Image (spheres, grey):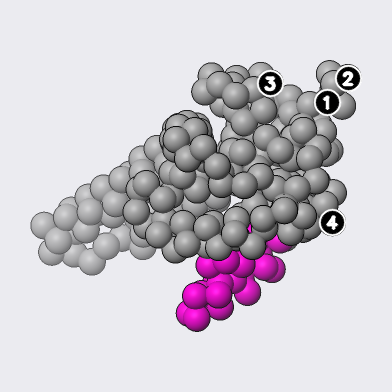
Amino acid sequence: MLSEALSFLKRSDDWVATTIIGGVLSLLSVLILPAIILQGYYVRAMQAAARGEEAAPSFTDWGALFVDGLKLFVVTFVWALLAIIPIIGFSAIIGLSTFAVAETTTSAGMPPEPASNFGIGIVAILGSLLVFALSLVVGYIVPAAGANFAIEGNLGAGFDVRTILSGAFTAEYAVAWVLAIVVALVLGTIGSLLSIILVGVFILFYVQVTTYYLWARGYADGVGQQSGW
């Protein structure tokens, strides 16, 4: 699977043009429109990967790319809220607790009680571990949700919890997810370093296409294995 993923973009008939367009869009992704179009291309790449195609798609039908990219953004954002909301809530609790202790001790003209600081520290550590675990779970499921949306072609599929979880918790998807993380860490680091001379944005686009291929292919294989597809 890894070798197919790494050669997915390069097997395209117009891979040079696709890479240039993708790199430019990546460079401009701080703007909303290029970022959404880029997401739409990743949807198209996931669809091709799920169908077992060997070559990456081209940048065509830009209107459809925008619509699909917007849908993928919605799917990703809604699932990400499962981690974002607890993080905000936990941060607020720690902040208010720290402020309350500081306010109380200041009013009394006394230094903070060691027990109070210790208690807040323990809560902060446990809460941070919980937030990390939750973020990891969400980070594992979000690509599966995106892949299910891409495969089915409708927004509701991105929130079909039962189907998404059944595909996510398979050996095929788990292996693909780990491979995607390794590719992102190794090649993504190289791309980030080379971004200083602009070459890196094209490498980062290649990395993104590769990781989306792995997610979609692993998810499709996992679902197919379970359903006999």
Q: Name the residue type under label 2.
A: Gly
Q: Which numbered mark, 2 or 3, is in the foreground of this view?
A: 2
Q: Which residue is mark 1?
A: 224
**Horizontal side, residue 167 vs residue 106: left or right:** right
Q: Position of residue 52 (x, y in %)?
A: 81, 37
83 or 228, nearer to the observer: 228
Which residue is labeled 3 in the image? 163
Q: Three-letter amino acid code at disc 1? A: Gly
**Residue 83 percent across, percent down from the top left:** 48, 40
Task: Say which of marks 4 and 3 sits in front.
Answer: 4
Residue 64 vertical placement versus 180 (above, below): above
* Label drawn at residue 3: 4
Q: How many marks?
A: 4
State whether the magenta stretch is mostly helix, strand or loop. Answer: helix
Crowding at mark 3 (Cα within 10 Å: few <14, some 14-19, many 20+) = some
Is disc 1 in contact with disc 4, using a CB cutoff of under 8 Å?
Answer: no
Q: Which mark is residue 228?
A: 2
Q: Is residue 145 magenta?
A: no
Asked which quadrant contains residue 194, the reply is bottom right
Measure how far apart labels 4 and 2 are at the Cα level.
25 Å
- Horizontal relation, residue 30 to residue 208: left or right: left
What amino acid is labelled 3 in the image? Thr
Which residue is drawn at the image coordinates 75% and 48% (left, top)?
Answer: 55
Start and end of the magenta stretch?
183-207
